[in-house]
Image (cartoon, rainbow, N blue to C red):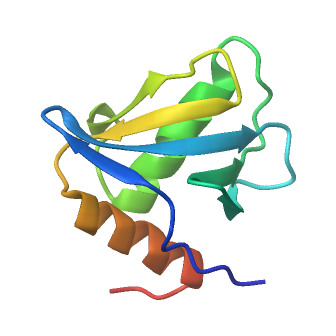
Amino acid sequence: MLFCFFMFAIHETSEGVTFAVRVHPRAKKNAITSELGDAIKLSLTSPPVEGRANDACIEFFAKLLKLPRSSVTIASGQTGRQKMIRVSGFSAEEVRKRIAGAATGSHS
């Protein structure tokens, strides 16, 4: 199943770019599964205990964007399923391009 992710909101700030993610913990695999409004729906195998789902979320986007973990942080939503992810080192356009490319299976 392929999804095209072009409508999720990305905001540029002085600290980097931010975008919303809705996390589904304890999933069968780590993957972007759809869009939910302005957010990306992210399935993670980790449970939502002791920060493991947060760590998995950061690791997922660091690998997807090919950035060090230190460049990806959770700006808000550390204790809930709705999170705001902050990425430093890329423009909003580059983040959108890389997420959309990974979601559709293209490798540029």
Q: Nearer the viewer, residue 37 or 28?
A: 37
Residue drawn at the location 56% of the way across and 54% of the way down: 38
Q: Residue at x 16, y 48 (%)?
A: 89
Please tell me in which quadrant of the rendered image residue 93 appears.
bottom left
- Judging depth in this view, the residue of 102 and 92 nearest the camera is 92
Reply above or below: 73 against 34. above
In the rendered image, the vertical position of residue 83 relative to residue 45, given as above or below: above
Of residue 11 and residue 33, the one placed in the foreground of this image is 11
* Image quadrant where one finds the N terminus: bottom right
The quarter in which the C terminus is drawn is bottom left
12 sits left or right of 103 in the view: left
In the displayed structure image, the side of residue 94 where residue 48 appears, left or right: right
Residue at 85% x, 38% y is 26
Q: In the current view of this chain or complex, which residue is farthest to the front?
A: 37
Q: Position of residue 31 (x, y in %)?
A: 68, 59
- Measured as percent of width and height from the top left, residue 86 is found at 35, 37
Q: Is residue 22 above or below residue 7?
A: above
